[in-house]
């Protein structure tokens, strides 16, 4: 392991890797992925990713476990989701096996950057797919580049698992009901910045409502929403939100805990009936919410200053699988053979 990195002090920020992995798509075929130390793109200024936002990305992690083995978490689900994003933006999907080969190669070439067990740090992968065809007329490109950027990152929460306040947003729509919200593309995040940055300046995060009626919960900033109502695990059903792999994993664990799992439209006012609420995603696993503030309606929905018992149990259950402390009954992790 690299001796120049203070693993316990890493934040959730980019750290320069030794190698990235690249593969190009030309004339209807993908080339083999290869590792390179060149971290820069050589793009035509009229590339479709720059002119028309033809790009998609993913995020996943590798964990050094309690047994010192390295586990990659549910990479096949990330590959499937990226393929759906590619199809949604008229891009060539990255074949699942090519995706997996690129992730493994990025890990192999950056083994010194896999953080030690117990530091809370992980090796994060950012797969990126961009359109590279030069084009001025509106339309999709036919050439693409797939890149895997690995970076060691610290825990999303420095110090401890804690709660965040969310502000209800009604003045910025993150994604239209039948737009690109169901795909992991940069435009969704760029369109949310006006709202999220305003919330961050107030020390909070942003809760987005549906774009059509501004009545139902859609997403928590860039993450899925989950709520606990008695013995029920609630999460929104919407055509404008990203299907979260973390949320899918937590739903499975909730069912195993004997909970009822429901995915449906959730009116904002139903927060008053919930005992716990959170955002969930790859970066944080679960980000508990202490309160949701609706300034326009002068309402505050409170859930407590500390993570609740159900969310805490789910959080630790998933982390135990990722770090090899619990049996992986579902085959979610792939052990990387060094």
Image (tube, grey):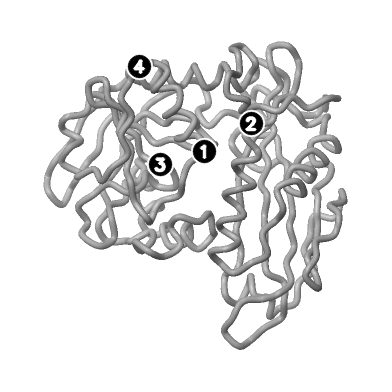
Q: Nearer the viewer, residue 1 or 90?
A: 90
Secondary structure category for the residue under label 3: strand
> Which residue corresponds to the image point at 78% horizontal and 31% vertical from the top-left?
113
For residue 174, what is the image quadrant? bottom left
Secondary structure category for the residue under label 2: strand
Secondary structure category for the residue under label 4: loop
Q: Nearer the viewer, residue 49 or 195?
A: 49
Residue picked out by circle 4: 258
Of callouts 3 and 2, the N-terminal one: 2
Marks 1, 3: nearer the viewer = 1
Would you say 141 lies left or right of 304 here? Answer: right
CA–CA distance in space, label 4 to label 1: 20 Å
Return the x and y of residue 187 as percentages of the image width and height.
50, 63
Whether residues under marks 2 and 4 lie with C-beta atoms below 8 angstroms apart, the answer is: no
Return the x and y of residue 278 as percentages of the image width and height.
35, 32
Mark 3 Cα shell of 10 Å, populated few (<14), some (14-19), many (≥20): many
Return the x and y of residue 96 as percentages of the image width and height.
70, 48
CA–CA distance in space, label 4 to label 3: 22 Å
Marks 2, 4: nearer the viewer = 4
Residue picked out by circle 2: 73
**Is 236 situated above or below 338?**
below
Of callouts 2 and 4, the N-terminal one: 2
CA–CA distance in space, label 2 to label 4: 24 Å
Mark carried by residue 245: 1
Marks 4, 1: nearer the viewer = 4
Mark carried by residue 224: 3
- The quadrant of the picture occupied by the C terminus is top right
> Which residue corresponds to the image point at 59% horizontal and 41% vertical from the top-left?
77
Of callouts 1 and 3, the N-terminal one: 3
Would you say 274 lies left or right of 98 here? Answer: left
Marks 4, 3: nearer the viewer = 4
């Amino acid at each position: 392991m690299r001796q120049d990195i203070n693993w316990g002090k890493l934040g959730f920020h980019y750290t320069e890797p030794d190698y990235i992995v690249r593969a190009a798509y030309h004339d209807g075929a993908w080339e083999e992925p290869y590792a390179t130390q060149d971290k820069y793109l050589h793009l035509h200024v009229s590339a479709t990713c720059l002119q028309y936002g033809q790009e998609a990305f993913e995020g996943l992690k590798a964990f050094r476990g309690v047994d010192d083995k390295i586990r990659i978490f549910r990479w096949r689900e990330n590959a499937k989701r990226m393929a759906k994003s590619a199809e949604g933006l008229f891009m060539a999907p990255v074949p699942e096996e090519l995706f997996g080969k690129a992730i493994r190669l990025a890990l192999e070439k950056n083994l010194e950057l896999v953080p030690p067990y117990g530091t809370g740090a992980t090796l994060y992968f950012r797969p990126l797919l961009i359109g590279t065809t030069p084009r001025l007329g509106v339309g999709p490109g036919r050439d693409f580049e797939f890149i895997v950027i690995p970076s060691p990152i610290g825990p999303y929460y420095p110090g401890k698992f804690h709660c965040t306040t969310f502000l209800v947003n009604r003045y910025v729509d993150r994604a239209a009901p039948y737009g690109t919200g169901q795909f992991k593309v940069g435009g969704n995040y760029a369109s949310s910045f006006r709202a999220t940055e305003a919330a961050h300046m107030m020390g909070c995060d942003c809760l987005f409502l549906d774009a059509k009626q501004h009545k139902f919960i859609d997403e928590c900033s860039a993450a899925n929403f989950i709520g606990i109502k008695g013995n029920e695990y609630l999460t929104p059903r919407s055509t404008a939100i990203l299907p979260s792999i973390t949320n899918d994993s937590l739903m499975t664990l909730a069912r195993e805990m004997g909970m009822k799992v429901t995915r449906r439209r959730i009116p904002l006012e139903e927060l008053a009936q919930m005992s716990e609420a959170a955002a969930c995603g790859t970066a944080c696993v679960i980000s508990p919410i202490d309160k949701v503030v609706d300034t326009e309606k002068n309402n505050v929905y409170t859930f407590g200053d500390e993570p609740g018992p159900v969310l805490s149990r789910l959080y630790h259950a998933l982390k135990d699988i990722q770090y090899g402390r619990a049996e992986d009954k579902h085959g979610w992790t792939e052990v990387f053979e060094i």
